[in-house]
Image: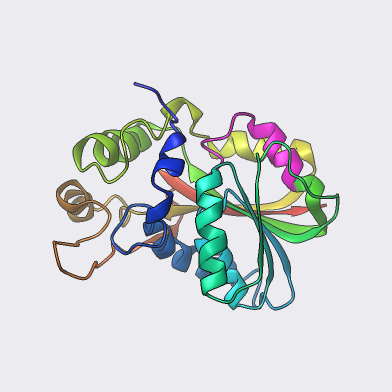
Amino acid sequence: MKKNDLEYYDLNADKWWKQGETLHLSSHLNKSRFEWFKSYIPSWQGIKVLDIGCGGGLACEFLAKQKANVSGIDLSLNSIKVAQEHARESLLQIDYQCGVAEQLPYDENTFDVVVCFDVLEHVEDLSKVISEAYRVLNKKGLFLFDTINRTFQSKLIMIWLMEYVVRQIPCGLHDWNKFINPQELTDIMESTGFGDIVIKGFDLTDGTNFKTIRDIFLKGLNNQSQDEKAEFLKIRINDDTSVCYIGKAVKA
């Protein structure tokens, strides 16, 4: 079976904005992400933001509605087309481009903030992506990210449980060997020039709570039954980085 199979995003691009679909779960995750980022960016108004790996534009539209000046780039052309169409329907001005994170089509010192969610564990060249994020940021600009740790727990939950048991995530979407230890990522960011790095757990398991893990085992990431409204599991920002983690870094 092919691992890190990114063709999934092209084949399922029409599902980004459909309630109950796996890709739309990113909208739920965004609520917790941006709640935590509030302590670093109280207001997004007028801020120039780039979303690396923007998919169908869920985070981009959230930011545009906060009056940010938003650009988004993604490897999936079909996802970019969906993002462009949805932005038009929503009367939002967002600059979308199809491209790779290792070679961003933007000038140096262009953005105040670069966000990168659910992406770093998929890229071909992690160091190059971090270097490109650094390059396009203004001095003192923020790099905001989340990704998956390379641990036994992450293999158990993100691959065995989520891909093979509840099939919340398609089999082959992830490659455990591409998951990133927080210290590895910190070392790359520091060698690139980033400082003031903060990393916290982005915990989907309620502190590895047995009941929560059982619920994931039985139902996936939400408690949705057919014809019922989804009730999503609570996400905690804590010190447990064993599965997923979130962070910020500042361009020196």
Q: Which residue does the image show at 28% across and 64% down from the upper left?
A: 232
**Which portion, as a residue range, is magenta?**
118-133
Q: Is residue 231 left or right of residue 78?
A: left
- The answer to whether residue 221 is left or right of residue 83 is left
The residue under the point 45% across, 35% down is: 7
Q: Within the magenta stretch, is there residue 40?
A: no
Residue 4 place in picture, x, y as percent: 45, 30
Residue 123: give x, y in percent of width and height.
58, 34
**Residue for point 81% across, 59% down:** 140
Examine the rendering and report whether any part of residue 199 can be seen. no
Compared to residue 44, the image places residue 141 above or below, namely: above
Q: Position of residue 121 (x, y in %)?
A: 51, 37
Can residue 197 be seen here? yes
Residue 201 location in percent, x, y? 46, 52
Quadrant hosting residue 8: top left
Question: Total label count?
Answer: 0
* Nearest to the observer: residue 152 or residue 220: 220
- For the N terminus, the quadrant is top left
Residue at horizontal 37 percent and vertical 58 percent from the top: 25
